[in-house]
Amino acid sequence: VMTPSPESVSPEMTVLEALQIMHEHKFLTLPVCNQTTGAVLGIVDVMDLILSCDGPDGTGGLQNLFDSAFDIPDDASESGSIASRDSRASRNSRMSGVGGRSIVSSSHTARTHNHRNTSTFAGANREPMLALTESDERPVSKLRPKKPNIASVDDSILKVTQMLSLKRSDAALIMGRDGGLAGIMTDVDITRRVVAQRLDASSAIVEMVMTPNPTCVTMSDSAMSALSIMVDNHFRHLPVLNDQGAIVGLLDIAKCLNDAISKLEKSHSKTSNAAELALKEMASLQGAGSQSQALQSLLGPLLNQAFGNSGSSPTLGSILDHAATTIVSPEDRVLEVGLKMTESRKAALVVDYTNGSGELVGIFGFKDMMCRVVAKELSLEGTPVESVMTPSPE
């Protein structure tokens, strides 16, 4: 179930270049290898890149990017989809999911909760969100939260993982017995709290492994404050309420980043017909590389501001200097791989040392563990990672 023979990137690649690749291919992770020797050096994920976008003076390249995206007026179609979804939720305060019931945060008035997240900042108490000022017209709704997948605290872990696998999602919001938001369960929780703890997913219930009382924001809260909460606490997901306290969405920081970059690209193509024609001509001659050049011209100045306009951004090698790495062999069993992933909190790189070269042959992530192993009830002790990895990852 792994991804076999992944393509890798160089440690000399800049964060900007890595962001381009992740955006173009919708990747969440990138293996890093020495391009001369083929030696596997490690793996970076989208959160690693986001955290590296802050310059030495604390100026946020990510904030520059989102500020620029927010300044672009929404298309009528985009505004309509946000408004219609929020207004529907406001009218009936209901989301499709479990029993058609409204899911209301039991601590909506406080807006935030003690979030026992799986990150380094687990258990940190947050101050209430800053409300929008009169001059701030950038609410959370502009981040276009996605529709959440809903489950109950009494559902089996197996049932929820199968639901998430079917919907190709990686997180579910969990409804308590009182109808309120009780927690969140992600693919990382499945590896750390189900696989590593050897729980029986068919008999154990979600309440045993979910992260309880997740931090929440509302549609009308400041979008930049919501993003700051996610970055500061290493949260990839953040539940969103409407003004009545009902759950209406889920922020995914990777989706937020992709949406912002796409918006900048779209605006750029609209404002310069000549540039658009040139881009199409280059694309026909050179393929996707021309798109990367256009994207670099968009993102480069925004991120360079964070580094004193020095013209350079951090390399992936500098990120790996401070990051843990999970390297496993193709024949390693999924249970052993899950234990290593739990310790490093990173996806696993599958490396074949048969010929002594250490060839990268696959990648195995937290979503792979949830969808390809747990949801399919495969044996943790008997399944080699090479049978479930993603082969040939970029």
Image (cartoon, rainbow, N blue to C red):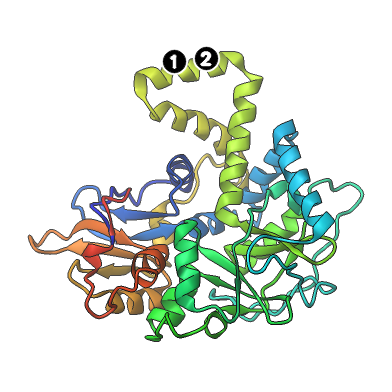
Tag 1 and tag 2, C-beta contact below 8 Å: yes
User: How many numbered marks, from 0 up?
Assistant: 2
> In the rendering, at what x and y percent does residue 248 appear?
72, 59
x 21%, y 70%: residue: 384
CA distance separating discs 1 and 2 = 6 Å
**Above or below — where is 356 with respect to 153?**
above
> In the rendering, at what x and y percent does residue 42 appear?
33, 61
Image disc number at residue 281:
1
Q: Which residue is mark 2?
A: 277
Q: Classify residue 191 as left or right of residue 350.
A: right
Question: Alpha-carbon neighbours of circle 1 within 10 Å: few (<14), some, or many (≥20)?
Answer: few
> In the rendering, at what x and y percent does residue 235 appear?
59, 66
**Depth order, front residue of 69/160:** 160
Visible in this render: residue 209? yes
x 43%, y 51%: residue: 315
**Depth order, front residue of 16/253:** 253
> In the rendering, at what x and y percent does residue 221 appear?
80, 58
x 42%, y 19%: residue: 282
| Residue type for callout 2 | Leu
Image disc number at residue 113:
none
x 84%, y 55%: residue: 91
Describe the element under mark 2 as helix, strand or loop: helix
> Given the current orientation, which residue lies at the most extreme front position?
99
Quarter occupied by residue 172: bottom right
**Depth order, front residue of 390/204:** 204
| Residue type for callout 1 | Glu
